Image (tube, rainbow, N blue to C red):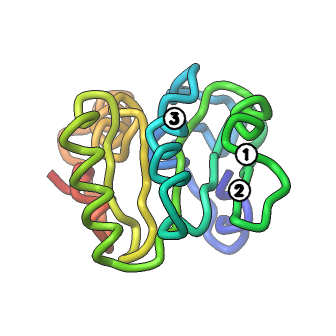
Amino acid sequence: FLEEHLKDCPANAPLVGYNGAQIKDHQSGEVLYEGGRNDCKALELLEPFWRQGEQIKKIIAFDSSGFESCKMRELTRQSPFTIEELKELISFPLYKVVCSVDSEQYGTMLRDTLSASFGDLFEISRSCPTYMEISCIDACKGVAARRLKEMLGAKLLVTAGDYENDISMLR
């Protein structure tokens, strides 16, 4: 979960990971919150676009392998398995799904299309021009920031971000 980034910078507050799907006390290792979805709906949303052509290059599913870590399961055009077979490998909850697309324009179209139909279930945003993230609406960065602020009893929570997938957290 972020341990490799904390070697030189010890944390004294809970950490938020996987776009808000997990909040963990770094010192004790206790998981304070775990969100995500117990279905593969995010993968199902991408399936028709995956079958349509070569615009989606890669699909990565971040799922739970217990409270210790997250597994990253990757499907590329060279993979020997399908989305259906990928769905069978998932350990729930499914934290988020990321897909790599061939162009910024396709990424914009995909984000807008999925948001229009499924924006009430998922936060759909880009983490860079050609990477699309699909996160459970109840476990996205914005909700996690508010949840952490409440857990800490804080009046103010300062956040920082660098791309579109951080907007809900910055609001």
Q: Is residue 62 left or right of residue 65?
A: left
**Residue placed furthest toward the front:** 52
- The residue that mark 3 highlights is 44
Q: Is residue 38 left or right of residue 66?
A: left
**Residue placed furthest toward the left:** 171
Q: Residue at x 47, y 77 (%)?
A: 102
Asked whether residue 109 is in view, the answer is yes
Examine the rendered structure and indicate whether residue 77 appears above or below residue 59: below
Which badge, 3 or 2, comes first in the chain's sequence? 3
Residue type, mark 1 in image: Thr
Which badge, 3 or 1, comes first in the chain's sequence? 3
Depth order, front residue of 61/156? 61
Examine the rendered structure and indicate whether residue 59 appears above or below residue 18: below
The crowd level at tag 1 (other Cα within 10 Å; few <14, some 14-19, many 20+) is: some
Image quadrant assignment for residue 59? bottom right
**Is there CB contact under 8 Å for labels 2 and 1?**
yes
Q: Residue at x 42, y 74 (%)?
A: 130
Q: Is residue 67 left or right of residue 127?
A: right
Asked whether residue 23 is in view, the answer is no
- The residue that mark 2 highlights is 75
- The residue that mark 1 highlights is 82
